[in-house]
């Protein structure tokens, strides 16, 4: 983890001693306890952990969707902590892409319009060559004029991926992107995400609780009880599963 | 089930507040109307009870012509002074006083203008001394024939005081009097219900108010101790015979109040009409709210079905919710209505010159009306969504909410059918084919047309919204907003239809009035060949009047060719009351007003001759030589022979009599005159000289022809403005509807909005998106309203072609204003939902639950 601090290029996203506390007094819940983590450019990182471990909270804080109680968050060279709504909107518009578990697309727009939406909102034109690459990678060229209701779940999620990719954000945050998909569609989407990292140097941070999904990543960071407890480089489904099992055993948590 | 309903109701209270508000406003109008008329009615009762408190029995001569309060003034026929002596001789009579009381004593205030009462009579009479009711506040009683006393209210309004020399217009032209006293009424009142009173000496009152010496028109009788009013009435009636009407004071007071209350009923109907419009619009709003709520609760309702609730129970749950909303809205509406009724009554009393109001009470009619209307409307409007809710299959609880676009075929067919029924009813009503119930048929037609068009609206909405929204397509938030407004055609349609109703009514009425105005003034411009017109504005049931001597004097001015003075009054012909006119210059018919003869001679009228319009001749079956008995307000019935028939025109009255007929009219002075100049005479030379002649006739003025036509036409403008203001309420309710729909949509699309914000939509862009959606919906509604209104207006104008409304005028400017207003309405309606949308917490919206 700490080995990356000496690198010349800043990380795509960085959390430094991030604390997140909800509520106060009796009802106080500490979601993150001093998490420090870096997510290198051009890598596919998965964040894993049992329910309530704070993995989603970490991602929300990294993406500027949620504020931190203490510590700082950077995306590229932007300090996210302390930005107002305008700054956050600009951050999301220019530097961050999102893929959610569900409700990912606007039902009124066609697939193509959905893909180009972040660019149109920002008033930018897509790079035609890159757009073609993205469309071909997701394999949706013949579906571009369809509305979300006319697409399968997997297709919809691929449209969402294309939308996140097309503006070439500093980092894409994916929140359980395969959570609502059957295993075949899920595999398609994950392959697609991995390829965009390998072939096009995209940075992706994905939250998941599925070891098979995590195995597609270059690196897996494990959270438990609001703290980073372990990490794996070049994981496989088995090593991920093993690590998860250890996390479930209280004695191992300290390690 | 009951608990579940209540809980869901509480959870969505904000959503229901807005739709409830529509019911509140409608109910407010209904109950307000009842409270207002009840309060005013009781106020009138108490005034008349006071006014006749000292009258045990009253004697009047039988009127020659019975006229209602709305049609003009009642002329109580004068009777000889000897009648008072006869009454005095009847056993049981303690005291009998001959009085003169008649409307039409108009005092000229210190500003040189006639003091108007705006409705209540301006009584002139003889001073019979102080009483429990009437007390002198200042000065003394009138002793000479050029002395008067007036009531305090009149003195205040005219800014005159004891010692002033003032002009008074009566049956005679202006005469000067000295105010020697000012009186008030018991209870420190300055006026009784806004009535102005000028009291003369008895001989002056007889000459000025009744037009004859030594006559009275009332005898006020006091009964001797121990004699009941009723028995005295009967014995006086027996002594006087059939030519007299004898009533007790109580009867008199009740009859007088009843006359005014008839006017109030009319007023009440108008208010209820507007309430109906408000409620129609409200129905759309409630229907929409419940539909959206049912759609949003699909999963919840399906779950209830899955755990064993029956379809009936689901309907019951939705209807129960409607009942709760209706009940609360009715209570609030009733409370607001009582406030509004009291406020209107207060305004009315101030306007009518200090009518002392009876306390505000809540009549049973207001309560029953409020609850019946509020509950029934709400439940009826919720019925359709309730039926839809019952059709939700239990499986919907397990599935993702898929709301496929239901085909619009059924609703379109129904819409076409209902529209056709509306059109047919309108055709029957306007074409005069509806036997007897013309108004009801037309109103029914309009209602059906509105509902029909509302049902057709979903179909129309797609293309129209697409075109309207094209304007915004260059801008991403605009495009999103436009797409959202086209997303649910039914929802958009009902929201827009609510706005349509108000705008269609305003547009339709504007089309009709503008067409009427322009047709008649166009006709006048084309045919009336008079350079100058003497006329005045009418401020009450009574026409303005001026000194007949002006006519002769005007004719003597060099350059004046024809002066036609016109008189008008109600008369009874063949058992029917009708307006008749008399003119000093019958030759003006052809030479000034462009009349053409269809039979006989229309250039002259000798005594006992009359000319009539071709329509009148046809409907009454008259021809040249027919003899027609006419009963005027005064004197015995006169017989006239038809000697000329002219082509009917909206500018010409139904019948014309020679000028000497006017001596039997209730007002024996002309109300207007047309002056034609010799060719080559300059208007500017004559106008000031005529103006000078009118110095003593402040009720009228002289204007050139175009100014007169403009002035006449503009009388319709006031009416138009009043209707527009009242219909604005319907538009306000429609705005509530837009706010409601948008608020519900924002709620429904929370996740979507969160997503948009997550991928970089700014707050301002979010607000722009919602605003565009609102503007598109309201523009759509306004466009429909303008189209439907213009069609309805055109249909009515077409139907009135025979009445002389020949020109169809579409008020493009006004229609443009409505569209602009609609855009503004959209922006205003979007404010709250937009703020709400912009404030959506991005994380909260997208984080799955």
Image: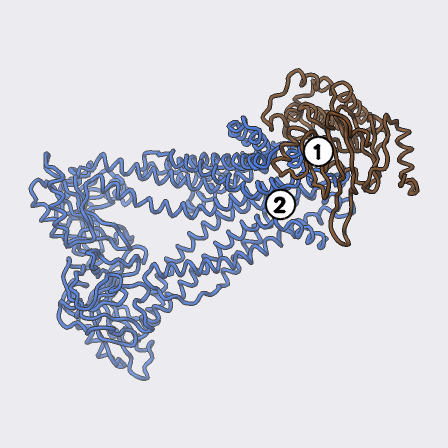
Chain colours: A brown, B blue
> Does the rendering let one see residue B774?
yes
- In the image, taking residue B32 as reference, residue B629 lies left or right, namely left
- Of all chains, the one bearing label 1 is A
- In the image, taking residue B591 as reference, residue B827 lies left or right, namely right
Badge 2 density bin: few <14, some 14–19, many ≥20, Cα 10 Å: many
> Does the rendering let one see residue A155?
no
Q: Residue at x 45, y 65 (%)?
A: B360
Regarding mark 1 in the picture, which secondary structure is present there? strand
| Cβ atoms at labels 1 and 2 below 8 Å apart | no
Q: Quadrant of residue B813?
A: top left
Q: Nearer the viewer, residue B576 or B331?
A: B331
Q: Residue at x 11, y 37 (%)?
A: B682
The location of residue B326, given as percent across then percent down, is 59, 53
Give me the disc on residue B290: 2
Between the C-alphas of marks 1 and 2, the distance is: 47 Å
Badge 1 density bin: few <14, some 14–19, many ≥20, Cα 10 Å: many
The location of residue B382, given as percent across then percent down, is 61, 47
Q: Residue furthest bottom?
A: B226
- Of all chains, the one bearing label 2 is B
The location of residue A222, given as percent across then percent down, is 84, 35
The residue indicated by pointer 1 is: A74
Q: Quadrant of residue B634?
A: bottom left
């Amino acid at each position: 983890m700490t080995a990356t601090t000496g690198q010349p290029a800043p990380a795509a996203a960085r959390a430094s001693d991030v604390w997140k506390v909800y509520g106060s007094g009796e009802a106080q819940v500490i979601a993150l306890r001093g998490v420090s983590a870096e997510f290198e450019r051009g890598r596919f990182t998965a964040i894993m952990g049992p329910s309530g471990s704070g993995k989603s909270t970490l991602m929300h804080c990294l993406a500027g969707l949620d504020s931190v109680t203490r510590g700082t968050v950077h995306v590229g060279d932007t300090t996210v902590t302390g930005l107002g709504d305008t700054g956050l909107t600009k951050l999301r518009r220019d530097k961050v892409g999102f893929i959610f578990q569900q409700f990912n697309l606007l039902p009124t727009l066609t697939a193509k319009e959905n893909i180009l939406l972040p660019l149109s909102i920002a008033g930018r034109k897509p790079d035609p060559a890159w757009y073609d690459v993205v469309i071909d990678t997701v394999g949706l060229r013949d579906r571009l004029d369809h509305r979300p209701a006319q697409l399968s779940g997997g297709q919809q999620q691929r449209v969402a991926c294309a939308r996140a990719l097309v503006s070439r954000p500093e980092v894409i945050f994916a929140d359980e992107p395969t959570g609502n998909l059957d295993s075949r569609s899920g595999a398609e989407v994950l392959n697609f995400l991995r390829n965009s990292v390998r072939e096009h140097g995209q940075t992706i941070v994905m939250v998941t609780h599925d070891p098979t999904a995590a195995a597609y990543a270059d690196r897996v960071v494990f959270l438990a009880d609001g703290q980073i407890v372990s990490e794996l480089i070049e994981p496989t489904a088995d090593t991920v599963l093993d690590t998860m099992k250890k996390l479930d055993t209280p004695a191992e948590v300290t390690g | 089930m009951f608990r579940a309903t209540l809980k869901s109701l509480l959870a969505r209270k904000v959503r229901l507040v807005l739709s409830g508000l529509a019911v509140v406003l409608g109910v407010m109008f209904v109950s307000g109307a009842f409270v207002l008329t009840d309060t005013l009615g009781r106020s009138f009762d108490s005034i008349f009870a006071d006014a006749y408190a000292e009258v045990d029995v009253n004697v009047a001569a039988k009127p020659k012509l019975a006229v209602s309060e709305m049609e003009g003034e009642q002329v109580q026929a004068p009777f000889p002074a000897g009648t008072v002596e006869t009454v005095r001789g009847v056993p049981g009579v303690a005291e009998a006083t001959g009085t003169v009381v008649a409307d039409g004593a108009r005092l000229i205030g210190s500003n040189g203008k006639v003091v108007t009462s705006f409705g209540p009579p301006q009584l002139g009479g003889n001073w019979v001394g102080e009483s429990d009711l009437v007390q002198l506040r200042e000065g003394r009683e009138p002793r000479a024939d050029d002395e008067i006393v007036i009531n305090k209210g009149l003195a205040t309004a005219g800014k005159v005081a004891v010692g002033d020399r003032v002009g008074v217009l009566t049956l005679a032209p202006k005469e000067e009097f000295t105010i020697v006293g000012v009186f008030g009424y018991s209870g420190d009142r300055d006026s009784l219900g806004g009535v102005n009173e000028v009291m003369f000496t008895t001989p002056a009152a007889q000459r000025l108010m009744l037009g004859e010496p030594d006559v009275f028109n009332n005898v006020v009788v006091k009964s001797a101790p121990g004699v009941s009013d009723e028995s005295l009435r009967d014995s006086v009636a027996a002594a006087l015979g059939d030519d007299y009407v004898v009533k007790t004071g109580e009867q008199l007071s009740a009859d007088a109040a009843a006359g005014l209350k008839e006017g109030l009923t009319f007023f009440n109907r108008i208010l209820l009409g507007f309430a109906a419009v408000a409620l129609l619009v409200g129905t759309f709003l409630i229907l929409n709210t419940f539909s959206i709520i049912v759609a949003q609760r699909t999963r919840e309702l399906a779950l209830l079905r899955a755990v064993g609730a029956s379809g009936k129970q689901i309907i019951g749950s939705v209807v129960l919710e409607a009942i709760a909303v209706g009940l609360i809205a009715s209570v609030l509406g009733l409370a607001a209505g009582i406030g509004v009724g009291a406020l209107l009554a207060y305004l009315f009393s101030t306007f009518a010159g200090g009518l002392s109001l009876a306390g505000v009470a809540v009549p049973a009619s207001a309560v029953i009306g409020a609850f019946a209307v509020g509950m029934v409307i709400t439940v009826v409007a919720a019925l359709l969504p309730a039926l839809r809710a019952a059709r939700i299959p239990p499986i919907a609880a397990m599935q993702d909410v898929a709301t496929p676009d239901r085909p619009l075929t059924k609703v379109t067919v129904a819409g076409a059918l209902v529209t056709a029924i509306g059109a047919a009813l309108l055709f029957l009503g306007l074409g005069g084919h509806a036997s007897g119930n013309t108004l009801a048929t037309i109103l029914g037609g309009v209602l059906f047309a509105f509902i029909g068009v509302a049902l057709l609206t979903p179909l129309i909405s797609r293309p129209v919204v697409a075109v309207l929204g094209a304007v915004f397509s260059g801008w991403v938030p605009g495009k999103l907003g436009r797409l959202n407004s086209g997303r649910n055609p039914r929802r958009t349609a009902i929201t827009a239809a609510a706005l349509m109703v108000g705008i269609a009514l305003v547009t339709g009425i504007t089309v009709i009035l503008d067409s009427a105005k322009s047709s008649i003034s166009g006709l006048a411009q084309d045919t009336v060949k008079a350079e100058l017109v003497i006329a005045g504005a009418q401020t009450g049931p009574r026409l303005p009047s001026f000194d007949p001597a002006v006519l002769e004097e005007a004719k003597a001015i060099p350059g004046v060719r024809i002066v036609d003075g016109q008189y008008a009054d109600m008369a009874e012909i063949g058992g029917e009351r009708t307006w008749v006119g008399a003119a000093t210059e019958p030759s003006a018919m052809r030479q000034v007003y462009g009349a053409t003869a269809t039979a006989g001679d229309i250039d002259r009228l000798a005594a006992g001759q009359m000319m009539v319009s071709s329509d009148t001749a046809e409907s009454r079956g008259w021809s040249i030589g027919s003899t027609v008995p006419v009963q005027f307000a005064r004197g015995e019935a006169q017989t006239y022979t038809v000697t000329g028939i002219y082509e009917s025109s909206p500018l010409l009255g139904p019948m014309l009599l020679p000028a000497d007929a006017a001596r039997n009219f209730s007002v024996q002075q002309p109300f207007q005159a047309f002056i034609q100049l010799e060719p080559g005479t300059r208007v500017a030379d004559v106008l000031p000289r005529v103006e000078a002649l009118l110095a003593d006739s402040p009720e009228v003025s002289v204007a050139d022809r175009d100014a007169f036509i403009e002035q006449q036409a503009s009388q319709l403008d006031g009416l138009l403005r009043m209707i527009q203001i009242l219909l604005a309420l319907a538009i306000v309710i429609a705005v509530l509807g837009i706010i409601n729909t948008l608020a519900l949509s924002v709620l429904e699309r929370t996740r979507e909005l969160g997503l948009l914000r997550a991928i970089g939509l700014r707050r301002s862009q979010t607000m722009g998106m919602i605003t565009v959606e609102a503007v598109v919906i309201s523009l759509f509604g306004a466009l429909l309203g303008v189209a439907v209104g213009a069609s309805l207006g055109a249909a009515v104008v077409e139907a009135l072609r025979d009445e002389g409304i020949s020109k169809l005028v579409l008020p493009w400017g006004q229609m443009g204003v409505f569209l602009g207003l609609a855009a503004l309405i959209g922006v205003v309606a979007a404010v709250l939902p937009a703020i709400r949308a912009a404030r959506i917490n991005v994380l909260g919206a997208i984080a799955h639950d």
